[in-house]
Amino acid sequence: MLTIKELMNRLMENIEPVENSVDMLIAGDDTKIVNKVAVAFMPTYEVIKQAIASGANLLICHEGAFYSHDDNKVATVTDVYQQKVKLIQESGIVIWRLHDYIHRYQPDGIMQGMIKALNWDSYVKQHHTEYTLFDLPIQSLQQVTEHIKSQLQLDRLQYVGDLSQNITKVAILVGFRGGGINTIPALENDADVVVYGEGPEWETPEFTRDALAMGKNKAAIILGHLESEEPGMLFLSEYLSTIYPIIPVEFIPTNNCIKTI
């Protein structure tokens, strides 16, 4: 029998301790025996209900439960917070956030999920701390965007660039790594196009706009935070099934609540 704490330790083994990590036991008792694991990107109210209904007694998520990066309880006075806490406590489910440590897998575990989802394993050129560089067969930006949309099953995609331009070198930055501090060095030194989750709109998009105005062959593709990191949690669920084949593991997708009209 495996305790939740033992499973947690297994997923963090051989990684240097992360100072001020946001990885934490959000709720529950980690001395419990693992019966079934649910894995999700975001521990939404609906995801938690679905995990409970599935019979899972452990939910592993990537982001926090209470609307801030460090779960600093800014929403504690709200009814929404209280109802969510009540659901968790009454069910007895254990919720563990795995954020910093999975990003420190070699290569980054969230990036591994993205590479697999895009089927770009054979195009990996180099893993950097903040991004992975791919050397693709020459193709248009339009072709790259269509491939990404198809592989990630997206109905929308934001971009800056000329869809007819040819590119070969792509840098992917998952999650909230789309700020200029990460993307500008990638565009300047390595990549024709950066693909990222999210970042300030006045940084990467504006740098790319000016580069294009100067005749430089540069582009940016913005996936959305969830869209860039959820494949990594699917990767984690599959990894769990390989190391603990007798423990049921279920991946629960988190539908994006931001809609377009």
Image (tube, rainbow, N blue to C red):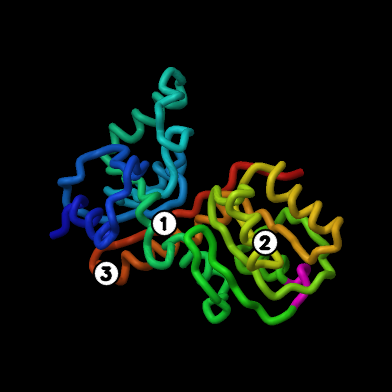
State the image coordinates of residue 192 (x, y, percent, origin top left): 71, 67
The image quadrant of residue 72 is top left
Dot 3 surroundings within 10 Å: few (below 14), some, or many (20 or more)?
few
Q: Amino acid at mark 1?
A: His
| Residue found at the far top of this picture | 77
- What residue sits right under mark 3 in the picture? 243
Is 32 in front, or is 18? 18
User: On screen, 122 above or below 132?
Assistant: below
Query: Is label 2 in a helix, a strand or a loop?
Result: helix
Q: Amino acid at mark 3?
A: Ile
Q: Residue at x 35, y 67 (%)?
A: 239
The disc at residue 79 is none
Dot 1 surroundings within 10 Å: few (below 14), some, or many (20 or more)?
some
Dot 2 surroundings within 10 Å: few (below 14), some, or many (20 or more)?
many
Main SS of the magenta part reads helix
- What residue sits right under mark 1 in the picture? 103
State the image coordinates of residue 142 (x, y, percent, origin top left): 78, 68
- What residue sits right under mark 2 in the picture? 187
Magenta span of residues = 139-143
